Amino acid sequence: MSKPLLVGITGGIGSGKSTISQFFKILGIPVYNSDDNGKRLMVEDAQLIDNVKSEFGEESYFEDGGLNRSYLASEVFSNEERLKILNGLVHPAVGRDFKNWIARHQNSPYLLKEAALLFETGIYQELDKTISVMAPNSIRMGRVLLRDEQRSRQQIEDIMAKQVSDNQRKKLSDYLIDNSGAELLIPQVLKIHQSLLSLFSERS
């Protein structure tokens, strides 16, 4: 039996990639959320915990084993080098976890890996296809301000500035989904779904 296709799904902050991922789940496609699993691994993966403590200090964790998010955030928020170091610890742990997850989902024609930094980290090169969810910055800004009340406009702009541009996204993606409100989402998802099913059957 053929192995499932590995498909990345990404988009800038506020683009709606998690919403789109839910549509694929409804179609029966397993979705691995890199950000959620990264957070889980930071409190479950012994190797990762040890690495974070040795790099950022014992105060990175509370006595009960919980992650001291505010301390870590203060360490990396305005320090690009420290953020790179933290990501350099978390991403390999997520990579290992993703491989284990793939092994448990071999009966699907394709698997989705949802990741905010799919292109920025180079992860996309390990996948068969990529999907980008697109929306103008103004719409994305409005969504994030509504969703994350603790974030300021400046913080959101800083995050957007660190993510790849829409032009780069278009060049690197195999499929694009317009989530600006101009097009219906379900027909776009179904079209990509059928395309990926066809690719899988061609490979089988």
Image (cartoon, rainbow, N blue to C red):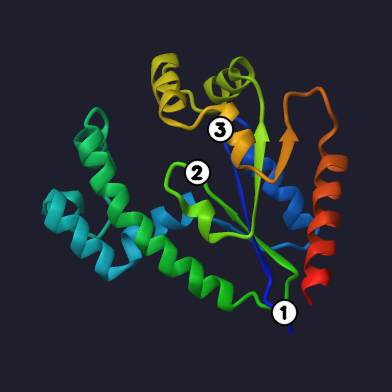
Image coords of residue 167 (percent x, y) = 59, 27
Asked if residue 134 lies left or right of residue 61, the reply is right
Q: Earlier in the sequence, mark 1 or mark 3?
A: 1
The answer to whether 187 is drawn above or below residue 106 in the figure is above
**Residue located 23% across and 47% down the image:** 85
**Residue located 62% across and 31% down the image:** 15
Q: Which mark is residue 119?
A: 2
Q: Tell me which amino acid carries mark 1.
A: Ser
Q: Which residue position holds label 1? A: 2
Marks 1 and 3, how far apart in space?
Answer: 31 Å
Q: Tell me which amino acid carries mark 2.
A: Phe
* Residues at discs 3 and 2 in contact (Cβ within 8 Å): yes
Report if residue 90 is visible in the image. yes
Q: Tell me which amino acid carries mark 3.
A: Gln
Of helix, strand and loop, which one carries label 2? loop
The answer to whether 158 is drawn above or below residue 55 in the figure is above
Image coords of residue 109 (percent x, y) = 75, 69
Q: Earlier in the sequence, mark 3 or mark 2?
A: 2
Q: Earlier in the sequence, mark 1 or mark 2?
A: 1
Q: Which residue position holds label 3? A: 168
**Residue located 21% across and 40% down the image:** 82
Q: Residues within 10 Å of mark 1 (few under 14, many from 20)?
A: few
Of helix, strand and loop, which one carries label 3? helix
* Residues at discs 1 and 2 in contact (Cβ within 8 Å): no
Marks 1 and 2, how far apart in space?
Answer: 26 Å
The answer to whether 190 is drawn above or below residue 127 in the figure is above
Asked if residue 39 lies left or right of residue 64, the reply is right
> Where's the N terminus, which quadrant?
bottom right
Quadrant of the rendered structure where residue 75 is? top left
Asked if residue 42 lies left or right of residue 172, the reply is left
